[in-house]
Image (spheres, coloured by chain):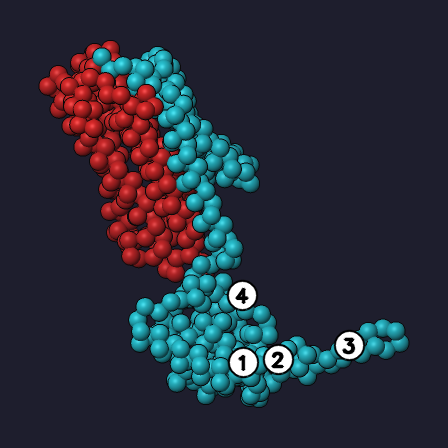
Chain colours: A cyan, B red
Amino acid sequence: MTNSHETGQGRHPTFQQYVTVATFLFIITIIEFLIIYKPLFPVTRLDALEPVKIPFLGILSTIKFAAVIMFYMHLKFDHKLFSVVFLAGLALALAVAIAVLGLSAALGGDPRAYAEENRVYYDKQAAGEARELAAAAKELAPPPTIIAAAVTQPPAVEDGKATAAPVAPPPASGSGNAELVAQGQALFTGKGACLACHAIEGIAAGLVGPDLSRIGSDAATRNTPQTAREYIAQSIRQPETFVATGVERAIPGLMTSAITASLSDAEVDALVEFLLAQK
Amino acid sequence: MAHAAEAALHGEHEATTTGLNHRKMLMWLFLGSDCMFFGSLIATYMVYRGQSLTGPYPVDIINVPVTTISTFVLLCSSFAMVQALAATNRNDQRGIRIWLLATALMGSVFIGFQAYEFNAFKNEGLTLGQNLFGATFFTLTGFHGAHVTAGIIWLLGLFVWGLRGRLGPATSLDVEIAALYWHFVDIVWIVIFTLLYLIAGFDPGPPPIG
């Protein structure tokens, strides 16, 4: 006879109690289904629960989880050490899950951009090429200047009222501000990680997105009447808005605004200047 | 060491430091570690939610009503497993065989639903390598399905033992340990169903262009 002391078994629930637990689990599952199944909402009107849907579902499934563990798996009636051992594993699992999700949230919810930025090259040749590109970009780029001061002017004060002095609008087709261009190139190969997908002759060799070697000349024709500057700026900030047709590797949905979200406005300006210079 | 193993073989009670049976403790420890295994796969799915570069996306292919049915089937199989253990404890030989077979059959029905779903997804263009959704979804549910399959084989093995009259109150621990594994597989599915189907099942792709 298997010693029940040895197996640490307490009393057993009755058949009726097991049926009760099973019915309880069924009912909860039905409720969960009703909460989320939109086609049924005209009848059930449970769409009112929409804002609290997720915590509610979480609580319901936790209840089911606990019911199965405590009754079917008998943990409620067994020796406490079994509970300790299992719950320790469960607690560790939850901690790992929370840590992973927290890490993803800390990276702005986009692990891909972070990974691109910090990629480790396992292929020696690729690593060498990347290092060369980075060194070349550094040579050309002067120490970063504060773009805001160069572009805006302090508001003129007249009669006690501050009026914004007229700011000269940047030229539509690019004037080749060398400093900005160099900065843009450094961003293209560095923080912006554009080189991961795009190619520019002599600078980058990305094969995921369109080749940008002639974008300075082509931009004005892509989405008339949008100017070249506007088109490039929009392609960086909100790439989903317009994707050119007939351009090699211009695939909708690939480049998202999330990819460039971490760039400041000044950095985007520098990139635009750099790209306008690619003729 | 050898003495303890011999004692266990001959049905005597080996001494343990906790006073609790080794095999049962092993199963609970294993289940604790399996929590971590599934926990990391589920967390990976959640982290990569909405990160797929290309379709198909969950809203396109996840079928919640059909999966709700398979969830019910798995819940029923847990009930059947409980009955199998109860039958073992009261030496109801016919009950042992019926309930063990019922559990294994319902588990197989669940696997049938999974196979149907995987095939339907494949036909819609979602494969393990298609996008992040495919990778995380198939890894997670695939491993769960593998766990269920291993459980079914285990139960069928027990069923064969039952046919030979080797299951009864004296060997109820064997059935109990299999039951623990089976119920665990069920509760993992509860978590997967809630997260992947009820909550994330309607995840869309990126907003349309233009």
User: Mark 3 = which residue?
Assistant: A155
Q: Chain of mark 2?
A: A
- Residue B116 in the image, given as x and y percentages of width and height: 24, 42
Secondary structure beneath dot 1 equals: helix
Dot placed on the residue nearer the N-terminal end, 1 or 4: 1
Residue A276 in view of the camera: no
Residue type highlighted by circle 2: Thr
Q: Kindly report which numbered mark, 3 or 4, lies closer to the viewer in this rendering.
A: 4
> Where, quadrant-wise, is the N terminus of chain A in this rendering?
top left
Q: Secondary structure at mark 3?
A: loop
Q: What amino acid type should be assigned to the residue bearing mark 3? A: Pro
Say which amino acid is labelled 1.
Gln
Q: CA distance from mark 2 to mark 4?
A: 19 Å
N-terminal of the pair, mark 2 or mark 1, is 2
Label for residue A145? Answer: 2
> Which residue is tagged 4?
A262
Spot occupied by residue B200 in the image (x, y as percentages of width and height): 43, 45
Q: Which residue is mark 1?
A: A183
Q: Amino acid at mark 4?
A: Ser
Rounded to the nearest angstrom, the CA distance separating label 3 from label 1 is 27 Å
Disc 1 to disc 4, C-alpha distance: 16 Å
Q: Could you tell me which residue is drawn at 53 percent across and 65 percent down?
A: A261
Residue A136 is drawn in which quadrant? bottom left
Tags 2 and 1 in contact by the CB under 8 Å rule?
Answer: yes
